[in-house]
Amino acid sequence: MPKRVDHHARRTLIADALMRVAADRGLEAVSLRHVAAEAGVSTGMVQHYFRTKDEMMTFAMETVGERTEARLTAAVEALGESPAPKALVRTLLTGLLPLDEPRRAEGRVALAFLAYSAARPRVAAALREDAAGMREVLAGRIRAAQDAGDAPEELDPDHAATALLALVDGLGVHVLGEHYAPETALAVLDAHLDTVFGPSPH
């Protein structure tokens, strides 16, 4: 009986190799040949699953997105039922910051993906969709805080959510460049969250 091939596992193996190459050597080092060597497979196998570099990059971005979503979901579930909006928003945003080595590697890859997609509208579509989804979640939590009297009524939830994401993106870039320590990034984030939700009780 012929052996069954797990095609998704092979595609994921290749995507993982791409992310290692991008994290260690930069996106300019990513090629079908380099990724094949990193994955320990033939260039022909890579080309069997991904006809172009764009296809390979898109799948790798989707893989990063799925893993990030799973990590954030677990962190939110750890808060218990009906967490306060501020606690939930802080958990989501700190989960996006490169505060440990696995997330730093992931952050370097995400930054490389962002630069790669800047001139490729089709590749950028998935990133725009992910960002829009996160903004919607954050804005919803800000509205919930407003309804509960825990955030200023005059605050525009969509603008506030966009500002929070932009802040986290900027902090993440500077943490990756070692301009700020992770503790500094967290302190700045917490200070900004206080302007949105008010100070946390001590």
Image (spheres, rainbow, N blue to C red):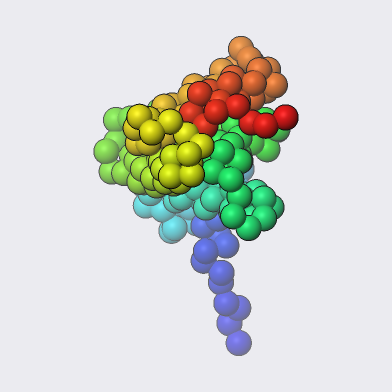
Q: Quadrant of residue 105?
A: top right
| Residue 112 rendering spot, x and y as whole percentages | 47, 30
| Residue 58 rendering spot, x and y as whole percentages | 41, 47
Lateral position of residue 178 relative to residue 196, left or right: right
Q: Please say whether residue 41 is visible from this viewpoint.
A: no
Q: Give 170 or 198, whichever is nearer the viewer.
A: 198
Against 69, is 196 above or below?
Answer: above
| Residue 15 rendering spot, x and y as whole percentages | 53, 49
Against 49, is 64 above or below?
Answer: above
Number of marks: 0
Against 93, is 178 above or below?
Answer: above
Q: Please say whether residue 132 is visible from this viewpoint.
A: yes
> In what quadrant of the picture does the N terminus appear?
bottom right
**Residue at the limit of the structure toward the front, as seen here:** 149
Lateral position of residue 180 relative to residue 35, left or right: right
| Residue 115 rendering spot, x and y as whole percentages | 40, 28
Against 18, is 114 above or below?
Answer: above
**Residue at the limit of the structure toward the bottom, as seen here:** 1
Q: Give 45 or 82, whichever is nearer the viewer.
A: 82
Residue at position x 58%, y 82% in the image: 2
**Residue at the limit of the structure toward the top, as seen here:** 179
Residue at position x 41%, y 27% in the image: 163
Q: Quadrant of residue 162?
A: top left
Residue at position x 43%, y 58% in the image: 48
Q: Give 126 or 52, whichever is nearer the viewer.
A: 126
Residue at position x 61%, y 50% in the image: 83
> In what quadrant of the picture does the C terminus appear?
top right
